[in-house]
Image (cartoon, helix red, strand yellow):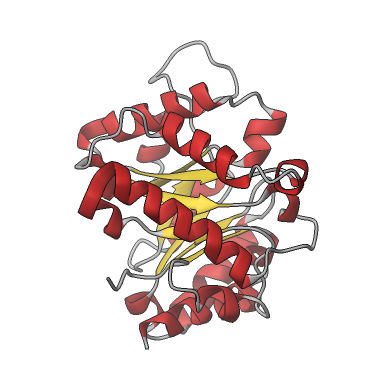
């Protein structure tokens, strides 16, 4: 099945209004790219309104890097689904390794966030579920075991009908911000496992789920990664802060259409 390539920029705690304008202009100038590739930008939440203004007439989608599982309340420093949706977000990252490791997002909390996003306002938002193993887990041969546990917990309450609002991003923790990256073959092996697991749970509905690779994706390694059959695009960190590098990655995803 031919799935629309998807590339998501995760700015993490970086960026500025100036970079917002620069990247928006670069995307706008690349005629035809946005027809072939779904491009999502996840800036820090305070920059979502600026992005919304920049791309109001363009087919660039916005996302939030995280959200609280509660709809409102005494949660200082957190952002609710109604707030990020009002600010223009259509996608929400959940379970990023940095959230899991540094901010206490357990498998159970990730599940609560997935459930709340998919229940929000008639499934208005899409969830980007991040899964991945640490280096010691890969070295001990537990990659598949870790990925299966994360998928099974996060998607425990997700129906086949809701799966149309789910994206899965495989991000080997040992390759994030380290300069290391999984080889195309290593990444494809894990993506194929994820696809097969989804098919076992959801049958034909699994075919529509975009599977992204996130782990030091750059302009020079993106073509080989995106050439693999089960890698539908990327979750891009540092390279998304450089407009030309990010566009080169998007063009590599566009090549999947040819």
Question: Which one is nearer the viewer's eye here, 68 or 130?
Answer: 130
Q: Is residue 165 visible?
A: no
Task: Answer with left or right where residue 49 lies relative to residue 122.
Answer: right
Task: Answer with left or right where residue 117 lies relative to residue 248.
Answer: left
Give the vertical position of 109 relative to 15 (above or below).
above
Residue that sits furthest to the right in the current view = 178
Specify the quadrant of the image occupied by residue 209.
bottom left
> Picture coordinates of residue 67 (x, y %)?
48, 32
> Picture coordinates of residue 96 (x, y %)?
59, 41
Residue that sits furthest to the front in the current view = 141
> Picture coordinates of residue 206 (x, y %)?
29, 53
Residue that sits furthest to the bottom in the current view = 258
Tally the marks.
0
Which residue does the image show at 41% across and 42% down from the upper left?
Answer: 87
Question: Which one is nearer the viewer's eye here, 182 or 92?
Answer: 182
Question: Which one is nearer the viewer's eye here, 58 or 249?
Answer: 249
Which residue does the image show at 31% across and 28% down from the upper left?
Answer: 157
* Image quarter (top left, top right, bottom left or bottom right) of the C terminus: bottom left
Which residue does the image show at 38% across and 54% down from the upper left?
Answer: 196
Give the vertical position of 54 relative to 116 (above or below).
below
Task: Answer with left or right where residue 78 lies relative to residue 119.
Answer: right
Specify the quadrant of the image occupied by residue 39.
bottom left
Which residue does the image show at 61% across and 52% down from the upper left?
Answer: 171
Task: Answer with left or right where residue 179 lies relative to residue 183.
Answer: right
* Image quarter (top left, top right, bottom left or bottom right) of the N terminus: bottom left
> Picture coordinates of residue 166 (x, y %)?
35, 47
């Amino acid at each position: 099945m031919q799935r629309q390539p998807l590339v998501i920029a995760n700015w993490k705690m970086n960026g500025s209004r100036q970079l917002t304008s620069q990247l928006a202009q670069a995307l706008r100038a690349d005629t035809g790219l946005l027809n072939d590739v779904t491009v999502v930008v996840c800036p820090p939440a305070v920059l979502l309104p600026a992005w919304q203004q920049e791309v109001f007439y363009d087919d660039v989608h916005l996302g939030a890097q995280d959200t609280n599982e509660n709809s409102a309340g005494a949660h200082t420093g957190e952002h609710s689904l109604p707030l990020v949706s009002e600010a223009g977000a259509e996608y929400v990252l959940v379970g990023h390794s940095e959230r899991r490791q540094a901010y206490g997002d357990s498998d159970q909390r990730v599940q609560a966030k997935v459930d709340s996003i998919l229940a929000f306002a008639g499934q208005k938002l899409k969830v980007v579920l991040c899964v991945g193993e640490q280096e010691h887990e890969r070295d001990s041969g537990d990659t598949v075991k870790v990925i299966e546990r994360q998928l099974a917990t996060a998607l425990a309450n997700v129906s086949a009908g809701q799966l149309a609002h789910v994206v899965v991003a495989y991000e080997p923790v040992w390759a994030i911000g380290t300069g290391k990256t999984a080889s195309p073959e290593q990444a494809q092996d894990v993506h194929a496992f994820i696809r097969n697991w989804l098919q076992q749970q959801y049958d034909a509905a699994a075919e529509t789920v975009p599977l992204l690779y996130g782990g030091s994706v750059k302009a020079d390694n993106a073509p080989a990664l995106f050439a693999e059959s089960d890698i539908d695009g990327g979750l891009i960190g540092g390279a998304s802060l450089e407009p030309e590098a990010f566009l080169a990655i998007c063009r590599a995803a566009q090549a999947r259409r040819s």
